[in-house]
Amino acid sequence: MLKCLLKGENITCITYGGVGKTYTMMGSITGGVIEEKGLCLLAVKSLFERNDRVRLTVSCVEVCDEEIKDLLSDNEIDLMIIEDPIDGVKVPERVEYTIDNAQDFATLLLQAHQRKLNRLNTYPSHTIFQLSFNTSCLEDDLTWRTTTLTFVDLASNKRSGASMKLLESDSIDYNMVAFNSCIKTLSDKGTEAVIPYKDSKLTQLLKNSLNGNAKSVVIACIARVYCSETTMVLKYAERMRSIRASCSCLLYTSPSPRDLSTSRMPSSACKKKKKKK
């Protein structure tokens, strides 16, 4: 996965199923301490070890009750989705941080995890971590590749407690119905049907990953004690495996070699990325 990422290809990793999804993606977190590293942290750590010139921008949102909320901000407003003709689907109001080491990412991961736990007292949610960065080509320090790594932790279609509102639970089911509908349409070879990305905000956010300029990895999380759920998960994992999408590297040229030193982020702490007006 990282080999393709460093070549300039966009990568998306999706955990799908009933049990073990969050553990696989985020690891084991107890009392604000990461006891076991998950896929997110392991990938970021390995990325910095392989290329110390990476400039990493991190964001994290959750989709719950057909609303998009920022997990790296205390602001709980519903974020807006826009579709850019060049960059694809974007959430311009989300908070972004720039980091240059794995420890800073672990700090952001803990923040997002704690906010999600607090909001889970009311409803579950789908979590989307997005990391974008620019790396210089080995043969030419003036040419850069723009790459995005996306981690998606899909919520289970189940009630998490007696206090959950019926509408909120149904919304999670509706998001998964829309997601499965997109997977089914994409996997049907020879069909020219319109992909229903706009049926939910979850599928809108995953449009670039499912059939855009990205390679996707699906981790099917199953348990033998849940036979019917396991059958459904394996069925859709097989469908997702049959989807074929084309990828290409996005390149741009720096105006001068000086950018290689001035563009690097400080290593002392995470800093918010300033948005251009």
Image: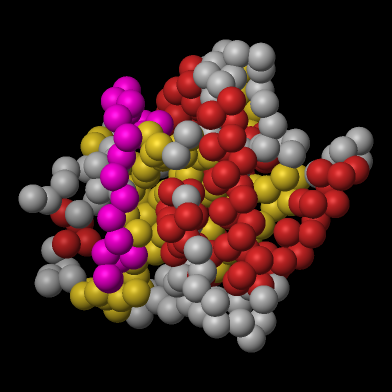
Q: Residue at x 35, y 50 (%)?
A: 56
81 inside magenta stretch: yes
Q: Residue at x 12, y 51 (%)?
A: 276
Q: Is residue 257 left or right of residue 171?
A: left
Magenta extent: 70-88
Q: Is residue 101 left or right of residue 93?
A: right
Q: Is residue 14 left or right of residue 249?
A: right
Residue 79 point in image, percent of width and height: 31, 39
In the image shown, does 153 or 207 lie closer to the viewer?
207
Is 180 located above or below residue 21 in the figure?
below
Identify the image quadrant of the N terminus. Answer: bottom right
Q: Residue at x 67, y 76 (%)?
A: 188
233 inside magenta stretch: no
In the image shown, does 134 or 85 lie closer to the viewer?
85
Residue 167 point in image, percent of width and height: 54, 29
**Quadrant in which residue 70 is drawn:** top left
**Quadrant in which residue 29 is drawn:** top right
Residue 44 in view, yes or no: no
Residue 269 point in image, percent of width and height: 30, 31
- Magenta-drawn stretch, dominant element (helix, strand or loop): loop
